[in-house]
Amino acid sequence: MNENILKVIDKKVRPYLNGHNGDIQVLEVKDGIVKIRLLGQCSGCISAKYTVQDIVESSLREEIPEINKVELVDSLSEETLDMARKILSRKC
């Protein structure tokens, strides 16, 4: 199933996201749930939730009926976390 998911993403999803200076990373596939992370400009977009539903999930479910849900995993990069730690550790 992972190979089919990547094929659909490469064919239908990634070109759309690349057009918005973004990309996608598949983190995990388990029990019909695909966990993803949006990258680039798409990672901070206020419409990310709708992109996941309207573009990613619909494309995957159309081609792979075993997919039940696509979940967006939001996380900060390690670089951002390090910067926050440095700022918070400064003494006033």
Image (cartoon, rainbow, N blue to C red):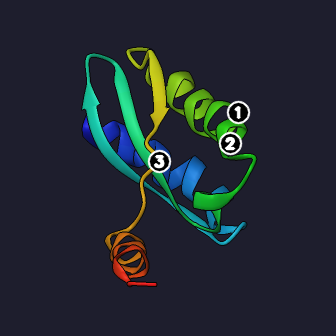
Residue 56 appears at what percent x and percent y? Answer: 57, 38
Mark 1 is on which residue type?
Answer: Asp
Label 3 residue SS: loop
Q: Which residue is mark 2?
A: 51
86 w.r.t. 33: above or below: below
Relative to 29, 15 lies left or right: right
User: Disc 1 and disc 3: Cα gap in Å?
Assistant: 18 Å
Q: Residues within 10 Å of mark 2 (few under 14, many from 20)?
A: some
Q: Quadrant of residue 78?
A: bottom left
Image location of residue 85, percent across then percent down: 34, 73
Which quadrant is the N terminus positioned in?
top left
- Looking at the image, is mark 3 or mark 2 earlier in the sequence? 2
Find out whether the residues at labels 3 and 2 contact each other: C-beta distance under 8 Å. Answer: no
Which residue does the image show at 26% across and 16% down from the upper left?
A: 31
Looking at marks 1 and 3 on the same chain, the residue that comes earlier in the sequence is marked by 1
For label 1, the SS is: helix
The answer to whether residue 7 is above or below residue 33 is below
Residue 20 in percent (x, y) is at 72, 66
Dividing the picture into quadrants, the one containing residue 25 is: bottom left
User: Can you identify the residue that label 3 sits on?
Assistant: 74
Residue at x 37%, y 31% (from the top left corner): 34
Instruction: Return the residue at label 1.
Output: 54
Query: Distance from label 2 to label 1 (Cα)?
Result: 5 Å
Residue, far front? 92
